[in-house]
Each structure stands twice: as C-alpha cells, then as structure tokens.
Image: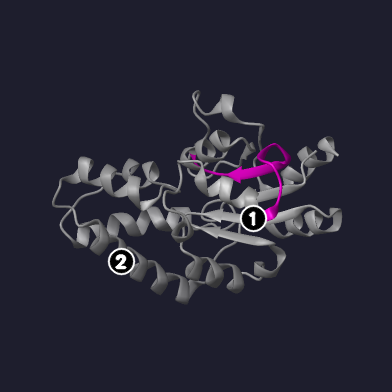
Amino acid sequence: MIKAVIFDMDGLMLDTEVLLNRFWRQASRDFGFEMKPYHPLAIRSMCRAYAEGYLKRELGEDFDYSAVRTHRIELMNAYLAEHGIPKKKGLDELLDWLRSEGIKAAVCTATDLERTRKYLTETGVLEKFDELICGNMVKVGKPAPYIYLNACEKIGLPPCECMALEDSPNGVISAAVAGLNVVMIPDQTQPSDDIKPLLYGCCESLDKVIDLLKKDR
C-alpha cells in the first residue's frame, strides 16, 4: 500500500516548465548561443552534472553554463515577481486528500532549497509537505536515483511503499531506478515508448492521482 507521495516541482506542481524553456532560450541568445526547442526539454529535472555536459556537447565547449543559468534565473525571477507563480490543476485537491488519509507528502526537485521554499510558500503549499529534498542537497541529482532514495530515507519508508509524481523523462527514470511506483502527469511531452514500461500509471492532472490511490487503499 502506498504510504507516501513524492512530488517533483517544476512542470508537475507549478506551471513553470514552459517558462524555464522560454528563459533558457532567451538567456542563451543573450550570450550568443541559439538553443533549439528540444534543448530545454532534454534537461528538464536534470541535475547540473548532467545538464552542463549535455549543453556543452550540443552548443560547444565555450558555452558558459553557469553564466547562462544565472541569467536565466534572473529573467525568470523578474517574470514571476510580476506575474506570480502558476499552480497546476488539482494540486491543492490532491494535497488536501493526502493529508485527510494520513499519507505523507514530500518534494523531490532539481531546484535548490532556497527557491523551492520560496515558490512553495508563495503558492501556499509549503506547510502541506513533510519533507523537501532539493537538488543542492545531493551530490548527483536526477536522472540518477539518489535524490529519491534520499527522500525515502528521510520519510522513513521503503521505495516500494512510495509513489513518485513526475512530468519529465529524467524524473521518471530517477524514481523508477530508485524503486518507487512512478506516475507521470505529462507537461511538455507525452511518455515515449521507452518510458511507458517504467510507469505505474499516467494521469492528465494531479487530481486524477486520487483515483489511483483509492484503488490502492
């Protein structure tokens, strides 16, 4: 039986993945590099150790990942300060249902702890989570499994009793290799044929996860 649900953040709880894509491309252009639409998609939920190498292979060894990333964060912060942080459909309903059922909730994101706390506070859901496990809290992040293994250890449950909610292939791979029951809620792309076998389920929105969990009770 599922005793905990572990959430990705960008693109899963918050409708920010499309903004990350937009501002990665804009920041790259400002530094003289032209990212293709598939480049930001490829690094969704990917930790720096993997993302930097991928972008240098694609765009050239002179691509300054740190500088471009810092600029991307500045651009996105300015946008969010003006427009707010949009939540994905069904987030509040799912979190409230989990609490009513006594099911633990945690966050497992490539985003650093400071920004994770900021985003979740501003969207009013921070207090609904038992644990936050962020990209700067592990040596190697997604798609490696360690961040999910760390999350399971922190909440005191084996991976087989935890469900991971992810929107991206890198996140799905991370959770699946760690041994969790993975549900994909697609955001920018649908699950590919090599991702589908890794999934416990696939839902169109977060509130639909409640039905999956009810079947498991």
In depth, the one of 160 and 171 nearer the eye is: 160
Residue 26: give x, y in percent of width and height. Answer: 28, 59
Q: Earlier in the sequence, mark 2 or mark 1?
A: 2
Q: Which mark is residue 154?
A: 1
Q: Is residue 193 above or below residue 114?
A: above
* Element under disc 1: helix
**16 with respect to 125 (left or right):** left
Q: Is residue 36 above or below residue 132?
A: above
- In the image, the segment drawn in magenta is 154-168
* Element under disc 2: helix
Identify which amino acid the numbered label 1 is placed on.
Lys
Identify which amino acid the numbered label 2 is placed on.
Thr
Residue 73: give x, y in percent of width and height. Answer: 36, 66
Residue beneath the point at 72% across and 43% down: 209
Alpha carbon separation for disc pair 2 and 1: 30 Å
Task: Rate crowding at label 2 as few (under 14), some (14 to 19) or many (20 or more) other CA atoms within 10 Å.
Answer: few
**93 with respect to 175 (left or right):** right
Split into 4 quadrants, where in the image is the N terminus? top right
Residue 104 included in the magenta stretch of the image:
no
Please identify, in this view, whether the residue under mark 2 or under mark 1 is nearer the observer: 1
Residue beneath the point at 29% across and 54% down: 25
Residue 158 included in the magenta stretch of the image:
yes
The quadrant where residue 39 appears: top left
Circle 2/circle 1 CB separation < 8 Å: no
Residue 48: give x, y in percent of width and height. Answer: 35, 52
Task: Rate crowding at label 1 as few (under 14), some (14 to 19) or many (20 or more) other CA atoms within 10 Å.
Answer: some
Residue beneath the point at 61% across and 35% down: 179
* Residue 119 appearing in the image: yes
* Residue 7 appearing in the image: no
**130 with respect to 58 (left or right):** right
The residue where tag 2 is placed is 70
Q: Which mark is residue 5?
A: none
